[in-house]
Image (cartoon, grey):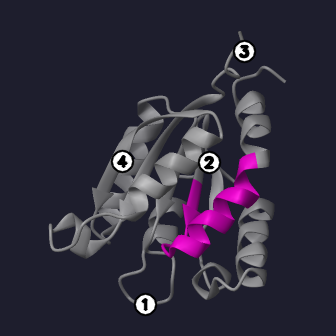
Amino acid sequence: MEMAPPQIGRALVVVVDDRVSHGEREDSIGPLVTELLEEARLVVDGVVVVPGDPVAIRNALNTAVIGGVDLVVTVGGTGVSPRDVTADATAGVLDRPIPGIAEAIRASGLAAGAVDAGLSRGLVGVSGSTLVVNLAPSRAAVRDGMATLTPLVSHVISELSGLE
């Protein structure tokens, strides 16, 4: 009998999308991120959808941190349009940025042809003991961003929990 590998932590997905938050469109990115996080051995507490509003984004991030999740992944609002405020809202929540991971996600996304990933202003950092990651919203950017992030997540979570 083969045992499943142990879970490495808890995660929350925050989808930043005006149309999805107003019920004008169905969320197709949240389920994809959830699937990729579960494949990375994280337990996903849920998907929260918020509009591109700095207060709503900050509230979702603070709730995740207070709730004790190990990782919160935001998707959307990372570009250069006036409504793309996820990075700005995230900056106010982070205690310590981890620019190397954000740069790796951008470089990898651009190399894979995900233009929105390459142009992303997304941040990565730590708030309390929670790793916070902003991803661009295309399916290609999410898949590539998660492929870049996944090998690093267990190490960061272990360091933040004091196990390493």
Q: Which residue is mark 2?
A: 95
Residue 93, numbered label: none
Q: Earlier in the sequence, mark 4 or mark 3?
A: 3
Q: Is residue 98 visible?
A: no
Q: Earlier in the sequence, mark 1 or mark 3?
A: 3
Report the Cα–Cα distance between label 3 and label 2. Answer: 40 Å
Tell me where the magenta segment starts and ends, as one range. Answer: 133-150
Residue 47, numbered label: 4
Pick the front one: 47 or 164: 47
Please tell me how many numbered marks the rendered image carries: 4
Examine the image and state in which quarter residue 38 appears.
Answer: top right
As drawn, 39 above or below 73: above
Q: Position of residue 48 (x, y in %)?
A: 32, 50
Q: Earlier in the sequence, mark 4 or mark 2?
A: 4
Residue 81, numbered label: 1
Q: The disc labelled 2 sits on which kind of residue?
A: Asp
Q: The disc labelled 1 sits on which kind of residue?
A: Ser
Report the Cα–Cα distance between label 1 and label 2. Answer: 26 Å
Q: Which residue is mark 3?
A: 2
Give the residue furthest to the front.
1
Q: Position of residue 3 (x, y in %)?
A: 69, 14
Mark 4, mark 3: which one is toward the viewer?
Answer: 3
Examine the image and state in which quarter residue 127 appears.
Answer: top right
